[in-house]
């Protein structure tokens, strides 16, 4: 599940905790909803029937039909769709059937890559523009939608949020991740090319020349993992880099790190950075997309150019050499989350949007 699915799921669950009836309309039940037992949460699976007539089943029509049926049967007040393609188009069709409004939240490649593809752009743009309200997870995304898709309607910037109680500073209790010898770094990744995990590995070559016992923990899995593992072997960094694979205890692992690193080519508003900040970590990240809206250079972390492992290493070495700076930046990260990215602050913003369209 990508960031849009994670945010949509968390948002719905949090509204349910507040007593609002929340219905998830989805192709597959999100992992985060498995085992959830809230009275106000219902999950509806979209049924896509395959016919020999079609090479690809008409998912958008099936989704719009399910949206219409659930809206009427459950007497919903509105639909909130995350990731515009094809969800905004399905919601627009459902509104034609039910008359109920829909809100579209823009997340990333639904604007910058897929949504901007000539094969989809005109319809995607039409459906976003037709939304009763539009939100984006960062100012960067809102600007991209205005400039690249030509959206003229106002786009409300509502950031992602993080559970600041689940992700909070605390002593490291994971023996497998603990190290007191030198600085410990963490990178959480889906190992896609855009994440440029190799740049982080190359930065460790520079770091370990100055700090031989420095450690890097990499959490996650994905298509580039094997290539990264081969690079680690080739560079002789196996004793410095620990590959932990997919983990469900990321909050506990974050507490064992001294800083979080992200080297992506582009990002809209990464949840991983918010989780690191909420855990009290300084952030070292590339100066791309919506990241500068989260990370203030020199205050709660360092911003570096993309494709510059040497500058990642330089930032790490600054933190390693100055424990007071490391501590202060970590405190500023946590403070930023509490001021801007808590559940209550973000939900209140969405509620105002909902009330404006009902």
Image (cartoon, rainbow, N blue to C red):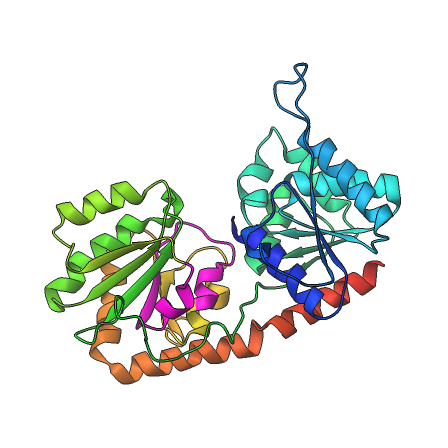
Say if 240 sits above or below 224 in the image: below
Measured as percent of width and height from the top left, residue 41 is found at 71, 58
Residue lying at 67% horizontally and 68% vertically, measured from the top left:
347
- Residue 94 horizontal side relative to residue 282, left or right: right
Quadrant for the C terminus, please.
Answer: bottom right
- Residue 35 horizontal side relative to residue 77, left or right: left
User: Residue 240 versus residue 147: which sits nearer the camera?
Assistant: 240
The residues colored magenta run 248-275
Residue lying at 74% horizontally and 32% vertically, measured from the top left:
61
Q: Is residue 257 magenta?
A: yes
Of all residues, the one furthest to the top in this rendering is: 53
Q: Quadrant of residue 159?
A: bottom right
Say if 16 sits above or below 222 in the image: below
Q: How many marks?
A: 0
Residue lying at 41% horizontally and 64% vertically, measured from the top left:
249
User: Residue 262 versus residue 10: which sits nearer the camera?
Assistant: 10
């Amino acid at each position: 599940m990508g960031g849009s699915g994670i945010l949509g799921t968390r948002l719905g669950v949090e509204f349910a905790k507040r007593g609002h009836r929340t219905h998830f309309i989805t192709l597959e039940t999100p992992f985060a909803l498995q085992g959830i037992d809230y009275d106000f949460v219902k999950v509806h699976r979209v049924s896509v029937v395959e016919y020999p007539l079609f090479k690809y089943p008409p998912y958008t029509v099936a989704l719009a039909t399910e949206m219409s049926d659930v809206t009427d049967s459950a007497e919903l007040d509105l639909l909130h769709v995350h990731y515009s393609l094809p969800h905004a188009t399905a919601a627009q069709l459902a509104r034609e059937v039910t008359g109920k409004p829909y809100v579209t939240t823009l997340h990333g490649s639904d604007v910058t890559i897929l949504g901007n593809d000539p094969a989809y752009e005109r319809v995607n743009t039409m459906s976003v523009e037709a939304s009763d309200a539009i939100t984006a997870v960062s100012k960067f995304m809102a600007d991209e939608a205005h400039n690249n898709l030509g959206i003229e309607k106002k786009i409300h910037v509502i950031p992602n949020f993080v559970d600041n109680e689940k992700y909070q500073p605390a002593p490291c209790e994971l023996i497998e991740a603990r190290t007191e010898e030198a600085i410990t770094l963490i990178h959480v990744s889906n190992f896609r090319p855009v994440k440029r995990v190799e740049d982080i590995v190359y930065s460790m070559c520079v770091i370990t020349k100055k700090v031989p016992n420095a450690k890097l923990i990499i959490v996650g899995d994905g298509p580039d993992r094997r290539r990264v593992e081969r690079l680690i072997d080739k560079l002789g960094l196996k004793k410095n880099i620990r590959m932990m694979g997919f983990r469900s205890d990321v909050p506990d692992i974050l507490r064992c790190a001294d800083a979080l690193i992200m080297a992506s080519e582009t990002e809209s508003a990464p949840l991983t950075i918010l989780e690191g900040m909420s855990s009290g970590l300084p952030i070292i990240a590339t100066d791309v997309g919506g990241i500068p809206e989260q990370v203030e250079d020199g205050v709660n972390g360092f911003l570096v150019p993309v494709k510059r492992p040497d500058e990642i290493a330089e930032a790490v070495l600054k933190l390693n050499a100055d424990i007071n700076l490391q501590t202060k930046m970590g405190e500023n990260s946590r403070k930023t989350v509490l001021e801007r990215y808590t559940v209550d602050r973000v939900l209140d913003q969405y509620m105002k949007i909902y009330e404006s369209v009902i």
